[in-house]
Structures are given as C-alpha cells and as structure tokens.
Amino acid sequence: MIDGIIGGWIAFCGFLIGHALWFHYGRPTRRWVAVEVWCALFFIMYTVWFWRMRAHEINIEEFLFYLNGVAHYIFLFFSYAQFYFLVDRGVSARILVDVLESGSDILSRDEIRHRYVPDVLQDRRLTDMVYGGYLVHESEGYRMTAKGRLNARVFRWAKRFLRLYPGG
C-alpha cells in the first residue's frame, strides 16, 4: 500500500519540477492549460509505473493501492492549485509582494490605490471567467453559463453556511 502513496508523491514532485521548469524557461501563454497538461502527463506516468511494477499480480488489493496513490496525487494537485491561484490572482498576495519590493517595506494607501485600479482588477477577473467558461461576453454585458451558475450556487451556499461576509 505504501508504494502507491509514495508513487503518488513522487509523481506530484515530478509534476512540480516539470511545471516550475516549463514556466520559468518556456513561459506558456495559456498557463492554466499548461498546468493541467503537466498534471495529466504525470498522472499517466504514475499509472504506467504502478501497473508495470505489478504486471503479474493484478487483483482488487493492488487496485485499491493504486487508487490510494491516485487520491494522494489528486489531493496534492488540488492543494497546489489553491496556492497557484493565490499567487497568480490573489490581490492580497500581490499587495504584499509590492510592499516587499518597494525597497522600504512601506507603500502609502495612495500608491496601492494607484496600482490597483478597480476597473483593471475587474477586467482581469471577467476575462478569466469568460476563459474558464463561467460567463459569456455579449453586447449588453456578461451572461452566466450553466457552469457559472452551478459554481455560483455552491459559492453562495458555502458563504451563507459559513456566515462569511458579503462580497468576495
């Protein structure tokens, strides 16, 4: 059983290394698609490795060991995806980096306001939601897709259930 878990971790570490090298040296234009491709590639590599090691002993126990490794790989990937999107799109994280890079570790409220114009922030988020298939841009505005509606309902339920503050 432990080899399935170790294999899932090794595959995830391979994914991280491949992803980091590709983004640092290759600079893909469709970044999240590139992340998904790397994830799928290492998932396939894990699957091939696992079953090649067990070509002679395929049974339900081995299949459960495989699924255990798959679960670890998927949950590690989901955890990494949260970190990725925080770094890529998180306004709070971006402000922290800006303050750090200011040279004096101080940015005035006006400097921050100048860097984070609401229209620019909204444009990026709307572009991302159209790209992700959550919204469709039409002449009169943005129309929600079925995918967007499902996600919005889940978010609304979670915010109400957890009693989170309004907005996002």
Image: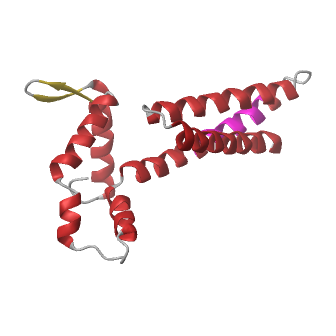
Q: Which residues are magenta?
A: 63-75
In the image, is residue 136 above or below residue 3? above
Residue furthest to the right in view is: 56
In x, y percent, where is residue 93? 38, 60
In x, y percent, where is residue 15? 64, 39
64 is within the stretch colored magenta: yes
Residue, x 18% and y 61% (percent of image)?
Answer: 114
Could you tell whether 133 is left or right of 30 in the image?
Answer: left
Residue furthest to the left in view is: 140
User: In the figure, residue 95 lies in which quadrant?
Assistant: bottom left
73 is within the stretch colored magenta: yes
Foreground pick, 38 / 162: 38
Residue, x 17% and y 52% (percent of image)?
Answer: 118
Q: Is residue 72 visible?
A: no
Q: Is residue 58 visible?
A: yes
In x, y percent, where is residue 7? 76, 40
User: In the figure, residue 14 lies in which quadrant?
Assistant: top right
Could you tell whether 158 is left or right of 86 in the image?
Answer: left
In the image, is residue 74 above or below residue 48? below
